[in-house]
Image: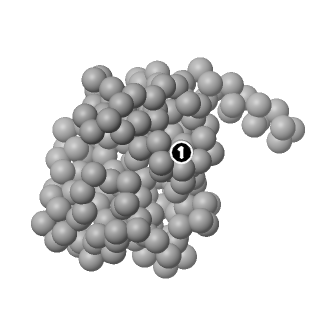
Amino acid sequence: MSMIIETERLFLREMTALDFDALYKVLADSDSMKYYPYSFGRKEVENWINKNLERYRVFGFGLWAVCLKSTHEMIGDCGLTMQLINGQIKPEIGYHIRKDMQRQGYAKESAAAVRDWTFNNTPFQMIYSYMPQANEPSMKTAIAYGCQELEEFSDEAGLITKVLAISRTQWLENQKKSNRSRC
């Protein structure tokens, strides 16, 4: 398995069928997935892995396994997928971290790494994250990796969905500011 992205505490790599048990602990947890439209059983987790294997083949990216450097344990997923957002297909950074590993900055760290990977390896000019309005933790993560609120819309059920995004231009400006502050 080749490493895709490395951060200070994490590495992100392509998922495999061997990740089923670790991913099941994330996606089948009702607390962690309370903002997702449906709950995950064994078949849904298997389909999730297979869908990402297909994304790697077709697009060269997808949701990657988020693993701790210290133990190599998979604690969630994070990556870039193409999503239907308010009627348009857009590149979106998504993330799911196991409940006992939340609130430690892993979602922000992995999402920021995926943001950098995306702007360094794709032609996308904007990257999005979207979530139900009630999903404040996910919204805070998107803001933490540099997104700003762009719009909101009502879905088929009448629920409000928030759309946040960061442009390549904003990312480059943030990179310059960060480099200047290190000098």
Point out residue 34 in the picture as x, y percentages from the top left corner.
37, 60
Density class for disc 1 (Cα within 10 Å; few <14, some 14-19, many ≥20) is many
Q: Residue furthest front?
A: 158
Note whether 97 is above or below 119 in the view shown: below
Write the residue at 24% across / 57% down.
Answer: 38
Q: Amino acid at mark 1?
A: Met
Q: Is residue 172 visible?
A: yes
Point out residue 131 in the picture as x, y percentages from the top left corner.
42, 43
User: Quick one: 75 or 30, which is closer to the camera?
Assistant: 30
Write the residue at 15% across / 58% down.
Answer: 47
Q: Which residue is mark 1?
A: 139
Q: Residue furthest right?
A: 183
Note whether 31 is above or below 176 in the view shown: below
Point out residue 66 in the picture as x, y percentages from the top left corner.
43, 62
User: Quick one: 84 or 11, which is closer to the camera?
Assistant: 84
Residue 22 is drawn in which quadrant? bottom left
Q: Is residue 53 visible?
A: no
Q: Is residue 98 left or right of residue 38?
A: right
Note whether 180 is above or below 38 in the view shown: above
Question: Which secondary structure, mark 1?
Answer: helix
Q: Quadrant of the N terminus?
A: bottom left
Residue 97 is drawn in which quadrant? bottom left
Note whether 65 is above or below 182 in the view shown: below
Q: Residue furthest left?
A: 43
Q: Quadrant of the C terminus?
A: top right
Residue 41 is drawn in which quadrant? bottom left
Q: Is residue 59 left or right of residue 160?
A: left
Point out residue 68 in the picture as x, y percentages from the top left corner.
50, 70
Write the residue at 34% across / 69% down.
Answer: 30
How many numbered marks appear?
1
User: Quick one: 87 or 105, which is closer to the camera?
Assistant: 87
Write the residue at 36% across / 31% down.
Answer: 154
